[in-house]
Image (cartoon, rainbow, N blue to C red):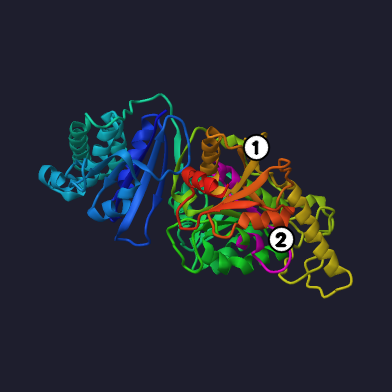
Amino acid sequence: MTDCTLVIAGSAGEGIQTIGNVLADALSAHGYAVFTWQEYESRVRGGQNTYTIRVREDPCNAPTWEADILLCLNKGAYEKSSGRLKDGGILLAEEPYGDGTLVVPFKAMAKEKLGRVIYANTIAVGALAGVLGMERDALEDVLGREFAAKGPEVLKANLEAARLGYDAADAACRDVCPWSFPKRAGSYYLVAGNEALPMGAVRAGCRFIAAYPMTPSTGVITFLAKRSEELGIFCEQAEDEIAAVNMALGASFAGARAMTTTSGGGFALMVEGISLSGMTEVPVVIVLAQRPGPATGLPTRTAQGDLLFAVHAGHGEFPKAVLAPADPKDAFHKMVRAFNLADRFQIPVIVMSDQFLADSRFSIEDFEIDRSGPESFLADPADFEIYKRYAVTEDGVSPRLVPGESRHLVAADSDEHDEWGHITEDLAETVPAMVEKRLRKAEHLRRAMEPPEAYRVDDAREIFCSWGSSRGAVREAVDLLREEGAPVGMLHWTELWPLAAVTFPEGARLWTVENNATAQLASLLRMGLGVTIDRWILRSDGLPLTARFIRRAYHERA
């Protein structure tokens, strides 16, 4: 089975993302399942970054580290990334950095043949296509879509650049490159997390987003802002995160489904707003895109370090939900579920993403869009002769009306209040009743949460417990270890708080596999389910988990 990994290495500003996106789109158009991920430094110019493309005949949306093909755009990129090249792999570069380098002088060719160095990147794309043995017309189709708006001269020059690179690499590679990627009949959606999350929000009926830019969450609001009129959503760049969450709460109180997005430092500023949502029982959805911390941390790297922060965010005791989608398809449906849960239980719902999920592109066969849709939980004003916004109910959920839609007064208060919404100091009856109401709501919310996904657990004696965006890597690690005879399985959580009841395989040893340093899922399972985790596999260097990393760590610890 075809399983080839390409790594494009270069400094910021050299266009490695453009090269990677064009080649990934061309391979996808060829009918292959493509997965891409990026690791890049927090700078506009300089540094050394990589764009990794994994190509298969069927989807395996999990990152790999070792490269079958390594393209280095400068000497520093070679010095940093050459260790990723497999034995027998192909090094493609502008000059001979080592024995066996396939030399294609991208910049010199661009200047000599096309008069401008700017076309060097397209020559590099063509060279990679030649190394892979792709059919050139699929690459030209993608270039046509990419550059058509820039005019016929620019398009013609880029098509010529791709041909130059393709022919040069094809000639140099003919006797040494083992790959062949002819066109196939299959097709996939190639989608990033920061595209799927906003699409899911729109599907859920979201009509308002306020956010302050913070990597890696910014892509959500920029995706929506570019399409705001088409999608019917109002987008506001707030002056800070405190304003953003309170704007979202105001829009929600007025009857619009509303959300905000941020990363760890911005989420810290939003915490008082989360408590305000809990007390006023105004629904809101918050996308928390994680990156390593604390403080500014590593703004462009990935982590799963904010789980316990999200679960415990807010002062006082009130219900909230925490979800963590595994891939873009799951992100689409989890966003719809987040809005429905928020409205049904009148709570804040936190959707946890991370830099890996936000920026990576996954091959999805079918989004099954009709599987999820908005559900309405607003009350009917005609059902009430006397309306109490915070009426004590059996399940803790009070009837919610929108201010101004009927003759009924809708009161809200950030202080403790009675059923009408008026401030109270009645410690004997009213305050205990409101506390118990919120706790009953929390219990009904817990019953609505989904259990973890089980994979190959029936005969497993070792269970990997994982969450969020690591699912692809953990599943692949389970399969690799099964091939070696290791009796492993996986339980993977995408709905993390409150935890649904789970039956663990009897006698199995439990591990957690996490992108953090302190085994936060292990702590959460102990707190929420009374489960003790025996061992853990952790990664906290800013890079995503891979199947081989997990396999190696398992053998070291088992």
Element under disc 1: loop
Question: Does the segment drawn in magenta span residue 124?
Answer: no
Q: In the visual, does 405 lie left or right of 93?
A: right
**Looking at numbered disc 2 in the image, what kind of residue is underneath it?**
Glu
Within 10 angstroms of label 2, few (less than 14), some, or many (20 or more) residues? many
Image coords of residue 551 (percent x, y): 51, 43
Image coords of residue 547 (percent x, y): 49, 43
Q: Nearer the viewer, residue 276 or 351?
A: 351
Of marks 1 and 2, which one's residue comes earlier in the chain? 2
Spot the residue most to the top: 185
So how many labels did they put on this image? Answer: 2
Spot the residue most to the bottom: 425
Magenta segment? 309-335
Mark seen at residue 78: none
Whether residues under marks 1 and 2 lie with C-beta atoms below 8 angstroms apart, the answer is: no
Q: Nearer the viewer, residue 446 or 529?
A: 529
Q: Is residue 516 visible?
A: yes
**Looking at numbered disc 1 in the image, what kind of residue is underneath it?**
Ala
Judging by the rendered image, the residue that carries numbered circle 2 is: 281
Q: Is residue 465 above or below residue 297?
A: above
Image coords of residue 345 (percent x, y): 72, 53
Q: Is residue 273 above or below residue 400?
A: below
Mark seen at residue 460: 1
Question: Does the segment drawn in magenta span residue 333?
Answer: yes
Q: For the point 36% across and 30% down, which residue is it?
A: 30
